[in-house]
Image (cartoon, coloured by chain):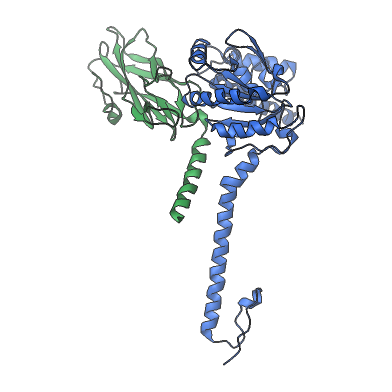
Chain colours: A blue, B green
C-alpha cells in the first residue's frame, strides 16, 4: 500500500501529486471550486453585514469631542409660567424630550419619563419636555392628566432647528453633566435604554466629558447628532446660508424671493413665507433652490470674467 | 433555525428601509376630475388621490382618539364653484405599539372625493380651484409634524351641448357620493 502525502495548508497542498490518478485530480479541482465559491459567499455576506449593520452603527456612534457637541442653550417659559433655561441645569444630566400631544408614540413614553424623574431626580437628573404643539392648551391638559413631574414648555421651530431639526417625534437628547449631547433617540424608545444611559452619565463627574460613552440600543441613521448652524438659522432668510453673498447680493437675493409666490398655499411671497413661517418646508426648499441657482449663476459669471 | 435567522435579518433590513424614508415624500397627492370638463349649473366630481408611503399611516377623517389630527381636504370655493360635500373613505382599524386600542387609519392609496356645484351662469372657459390635503403621518415608532399638500385643480366649463368624457373612472368607483 502506497503511503499518502500529508495534507498541508498551502496552495501547493491542493494540487494532486504528479502521477496521481485522474479521479484524485478531479476531486482536488472540485475542492478548489467549492473553496472559491465559499470565499465569494463570505465576501458578499461581509459586504451586506457591513452595509446594513456595521457602517450605520459606526457612522452614528459618537467618536469623541466633536461628536459630543455642546447642547444649544435655550430660554423658554414653561406651561406653569416659570422660566425654563437649559443653563439652570448645568452640572445635571438632562433628557430633553421633543414631543407633542397629537403624537401617540410620544404619549406612550411619558409615564416612563415620569418614573425616571422619580428615580433619578435626586441624583442630579432632570427630564425636560419641549412640546411642539401649536398652542399650550392641550399640553396643559395632558400635563395635569398624567401628573407630569418635570418642566414642560411649548417649543418653536427655531429651537428645533438649533437641535438639528426635529422631523420625527418623539426625539430625545441625552445631555451630560458637562452640557454636551451624548445621545439622540428618534422614535419611541424603551425606558430601560434611557435608564442605562442616564446611570452612565450620572456616574461621570460634573464638567468631565464622558469620552467612552456609547449610545445604548439600536442606533438608526436619524439618531446621529448634527446641530443646526445659528448663523444660518437666524439669517435674514431663515434657514438659508447667506454667508457667501455680499451685502448687495443679499439684497438682490431677497428681492428675487419677494418676487416669487410660495407654493404652500399661504398666499405670501417666498421671503415673507420664510420669515413668518420658518417651519414651512415648501418655502425652505424653494428658497434653497433659488440660492443654489443664484450661487451657480454667480460662479459661472465670475468664470466667464476670468 | 436558519429560517428564523434569515427572517430576523430581513426584518431588520426592512425596518431600516422604512425608517430611512425621505420624510418629505411620505404623502403624495394629486387631484383629478371625473370628467374632462363640466357644464354650468351642474354637479362636478373631484377626487384627491393620496399615496401614503409604506410603513406610514395617516389618521382617519374621524380619528379613533380625540387627540389625533384628522385627515382633511379643504377646497376653496370660488365665484364659479361651490363645494357641496367632501366624502372620505372609511379607515382601516390597525393596532400599533403605541396604542392599546386599534386606530382607524389610512394606509397606502387613499381617495377622497368632493362634489362641486357649478354656478348657474358660469361662462365657458378654464378655471382653477385651490385645495389642500392636510394630514399628520406616523409610523409605529414616530410621528411627523402635521403637513399639507397644496393642490391646484383646473376645471374646464363647456357649453351644455358638448358631451363630457369620463376621466379615470376606476378612481371614482372608489368614492361613495350620496
In this rendering, the answer to whether A23 lies above or below B15 is below
The residue lying toward the viewer, choosing from A84 and A287, is: A84
* Count of marks, rendered view: 0
Q: Quadrant of the N terminus of chain A?
A: bottom right
In this rendering, the answer to whether A5 lies above or below A183 is below
The residue lying toward the viewer, choosing from A5 and A229, is: A5
Could you tell me which residue is drawn at 45 percent across and 51 percent down? B4
Q: Quadrant of the C terminus of chain A?
A: top right
Could you tell me which residue is drawn at 62 percent across and 45 percent down? A55
Res A289 seen here:
no
Residue B3's spot in the image, x, y percent? 43, 54
- Indicate the quadrant where residue A301 lies: top right
Could you tell me which residue is drawn at 60 percent across and 32 percent down? A195
The residue lying toward the viewer, choosing from A264 and B156, is: A264
The residue furthest bottom is A1
In this rendering, the answer to whether A189 lies above or below B9 is above
Amino acid at each position: 500500500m502506497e503511503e499518502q502525502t500529508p495534507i498541508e495548508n498551502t496552495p501547493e497542498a491542493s494540487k494532486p501529486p504528479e502521477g496521481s490518478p485522474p479521479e484524485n485530480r478531479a476531486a482536488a479541482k472540485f475542492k478548489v471550486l467549492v473553496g472559491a465559491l465559499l470565499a465569494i459567499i463570505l465576501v458578499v455576506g461581509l459586504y451586506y453585514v457591513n452595509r446594513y449593520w456595521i457602517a450605520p452603527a459606526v457612522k452614528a456612534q459618537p467618536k469623541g469631542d466633536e461628536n459630543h457637541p455642546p447642547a444649544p442653550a435655550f430660554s423658554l417659559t414653561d406651561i406653569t409660567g416659570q422660566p425654563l433655561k437649559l443653563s439652570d441645569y448645568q452640572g445635571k444630566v438632562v433628557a430633553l424630550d421633543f414631543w407633542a400631544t397629537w403624537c401617540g408614540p410620544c404619549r406612550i413614553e411619558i409615564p416612563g419619563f415620569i418614573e425616571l424623574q422619580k428615580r433619578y431626580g435626586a441624583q442630579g437628573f432632570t427630564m425636560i419636555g419641549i412640546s411642539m404643539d401649536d398652542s399650550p392648551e392641550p399640553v396643559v391638559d395632558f400635563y395635569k392628566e398624567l401628573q407630569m413631574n418635570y418642566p414642560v414648555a411649548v417649543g418653536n421651530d427655531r429651537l428645533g432647528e438649533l437641535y438639528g431639526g426635529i422631523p420625527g417625534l418623539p426625539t430625545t437628547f441625552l445631555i451630560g453633566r458637562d452640557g454636551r449631547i451624548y445621545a439622540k433617540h428618534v422614535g419611541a424608545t424603551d425606558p430601560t435604554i434611557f435608564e442605562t444611559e442616564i446611570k452612565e452619565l450620572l456616574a461621570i463627574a460634573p464638567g468631565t466629558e464622558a469620552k467612552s460613552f456609547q449610545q445604548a440600543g439600536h442606533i438608526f441613521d436619524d439618531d446621529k447628532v448634527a446641530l443646526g448652524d445659528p448663523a444660518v438659522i437666524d439669517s435674514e432668510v431663515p434657514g438659508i446660508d447667506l454667508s457667501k453673498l455680499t451685502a448687495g447680493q443679499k439684497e438682490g437675493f431677497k428681492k428675487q424671493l419677494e418676487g416669487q409666490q410660495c407654493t404652500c398655499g399661504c398666499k405670501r411671497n417666498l421671503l415673507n413665507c420664510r420669515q413668518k413661517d420658518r417651519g414651512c418646508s415648501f418655502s425652505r426648499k424653494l428658497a434653497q433652490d433659488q440660492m443654489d441657482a443664484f450661487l451657480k449663476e454667480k460662479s459661472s459669471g465670475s468664470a466667464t470674467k476670468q | 433555525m436558519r429560517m428564523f435567522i434569515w427572517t430576523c435579518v430581513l426584518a431588520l433590513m426592512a425596518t431600516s428601509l422604512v425608517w430611512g424614508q425621505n420624510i418629505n415624500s411620505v404623502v403624495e397627492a394629486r387631484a383629478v376630475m371625473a370628467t374632462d370638463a363640466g357644464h354650468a349649473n351642474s354637479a362636478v366630481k373631484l377626487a384627491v388621490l393620496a399615496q401614503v408611503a409604506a410603513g406610514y399611516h395617516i389618521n382617519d377623517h374621524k380619528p379613533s382618539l380625540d387627540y389625533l389630527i384628522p385627515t382633511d381636504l379643504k377646497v376653496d370655493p370660488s365665484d364659479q364653484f361651490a363645494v357641496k360635500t367632501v366624502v372620505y373613505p372609511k379607515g382601516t382599524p390597525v393596532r400599533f405599539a403605541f396604542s392599546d386600542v386599534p386606530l382607524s387609519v389610512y394606509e397606502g392609496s387613499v381617495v377622497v372625493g368632493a362634489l362641486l356645484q357649478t354656478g348657474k351662469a358660469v361662462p365657458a372657459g378654464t378655471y382653477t380651484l385651490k385645495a389642500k390635503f392636510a394630514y399628520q403621518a406616523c409610523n409605529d415608532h414616530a410621528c411627523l409634524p402635521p403637513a399639507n399638500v397644496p393642490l391646484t385643480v383646473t376645471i374646464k366649463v363647456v357649453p351644455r351641448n358638448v358631451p363630457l368624457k369620463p376621466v379615470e373612472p376606476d378612481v371614482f368607483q372608489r368614492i361613495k357620493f350620496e
